Image (spheres, coloured by chain):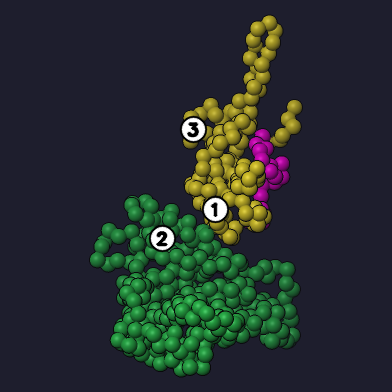
Chain colours: A yellow, B green
Amino acid sequence: MMTNQGNRVTQGQFSFLPDLTDAQITAQIKYALGKDWALSVEYTDDPHPRNTYWEMFGNPMFDLKDPAGILLEVNNCRKTYPNHYIRVIAFSAVRGVESVTMSYIVNRPKKEPGFSLVRQETEGRCIRYTIHSYATDKPEGERY
Amino acid sequence: MSDTDNITVLPDDMSVDLDAELNASNVQEIFDKLDRELIGLKPVKTRIREIAALLLVDRLRKRFALTSETPTLHMNFTGNPGTGKTTVALRMAEILHRLDYVRTGHLVSVTRDDLVGQYIGHTAPKTKEVIKKAMGGVLFIDEAYYLYKPENERDYGAESIEILLQVMENNRDDLVVILAGYKDRMDKFFHSNPGMRSRIAHHVDFPDYSPEELLHIAKLMLAAQNYRFSPDAEKAFFQYIQLRMKLEHFANARSVRNALDRARLRQANRLFASKNKALKKIDLITLEAEDILASRVFTDGMLDNESEVNIAAQK
């Protein structure tokens, strides 16, 4: 039974929607900038949902006033890693929050092979379940 | 730059009102402010008006779906120290924002230090970061000729210029670059960077101020700080300006500001010296002739202190 057809990785905001267009990304960035959040671009080729820390593409961008600068970085990253997952995250430095407040995928591989369910038999008849991405069978950088 | 998609195209025989468009943009307000607060600078104001007119007409043309390429508005301000280059650049950002040419209308003011790195591979990210910050607004590069140092071929300034050129060409919609510097040095700079020269459409020369204009500026500066000249002091200051202009390192409005700061010091000192006298508000706001005449420009024909010389030399 497939509940997520096409094996699209659903992480962060908007991930059940069709891919965001550049205009939509710009609008989201504008919203974040309006809240004084610092944006940054990250990429990875390990789609496991527990893979929290992706690679940073350049430094986080503080003190920007206009979305064009961030979209420029997004496009640079797309050019460098056309077949990786790329996300934009917004960091709020407000005291008491001090964490990521927005995160959405802006680029994904053309073909996402999805995950397999791995069953591990342990003591008694106990079974442990885990998921494993087909893509991660290959070494980093050659996955997609 | 503004989204033209949702504006319906007007029929060919329809007429549009340029005045209404002007009013809608509130640009007139800025022009008035410019006239009020910036003394002299005739060629600069004319150029700003021309640019504003072009952008307004462009907006009207868009209503008839007459597309034309977005004009390049990169500018080059040349002029002697203290002629108001930075002030005008700041206003420029505001004007372009009102005319919808730039999106946010902020000004990012940088010099060589902010653009050029210290080791290999440091310059490009540094320059790009500055450019990203300036997007949607105006990037003002003060003393731009320092970017290029012909005597050192391994200087990283050239790398920075290259990136700038690329952005000035490809991201014309995103930011306006304004270069500023002294005339002769900027000419040399453009001579060795022809690509830069051709990408800058507007070369604006800032003339020196006349003594009358400087006096006017001085009065505006004082008014902004809630001071004023007594009639004698005004005459004395006019004389001061004329004498000071003949001395070296004269930096137009900047020298005037420094002279006023020193006059304020002397006024405070004078008020202290007359301790037993009850002071009124008018005493506190008035600069007297003696505050001005105490300057060494009058007595020895010399500059007041070394610090101004140093500042002027740096600038």
Q: CA distance from mark 1 to mark 2?
A: 17 Å
Expressed as whole percent of the image width and height from the top left, the position of residue B122 reads 38, 52
Identity of the residue furthest to the front in this view:
B276
Q: Are marks 3 and 2 on the same chain?
A: no
User: Is B122 or A71 nearer to us in this picture?
Assistant: B122
Q: Quadrant of residue B5?
A: bottom right
Q: CA distance from mark 3 to mark 2?
A: 35 Å
Overall secondary structure of the magenta section = loop
Expressed as whole percent of the image width and height from the top left, the position of residue A80 reads 48, 47
Q: Classify the position of the C terminus of chain A by image quarter.
A: top right
Q: Quadrant of residue B293?
A: bottom left
Expressed as whole percent of the image width and height from the top left, the position of residue B81 reads 39, 78
Q: Amino acid at mark 1?
A: Phe
| Circle number at residue A34 | none
List the residue tagged with mark 2. Answer: B115
Under tag 3, what secondary structure? loop
- Is A113 left, or right, of A76 in this rendering? right
Q: Earlier in the sequence, mark 1 or mark 3?
A: 1
Mark 1 or mark 3: which is in front?
1
* Within-10-Å neighbours for mark 3: few <14, some 14–19, many 20+: few
List the residue tagged with mark 3. Answer: A140
Under tag 2, what secondary structure? helix
* Within-10-Å neighbours for mark 1: few <14, some 14–19, many 20+: some
Identity of the residue furthest to the top in this view:
A124
Expressed as whole percent of the image width and height from the top left, the position of residue A123 reads 65, 7
Q: Which residue is pictured at 61% across the width and 72% down the height?
A: B97
Q: Amino acid at mark 2?
A: Leu
- Is B112 left, or right, of B53 in this rendering? left
User: Is A133 or A88 nearer to us in this picture?
Assistant: A88
Q: CA distance from mark 1 to mark 3?
A: 30 Å
List the residue tagged with mark 1. Answer: A62
What's drawn in magenta, residue-wise?
A7-29
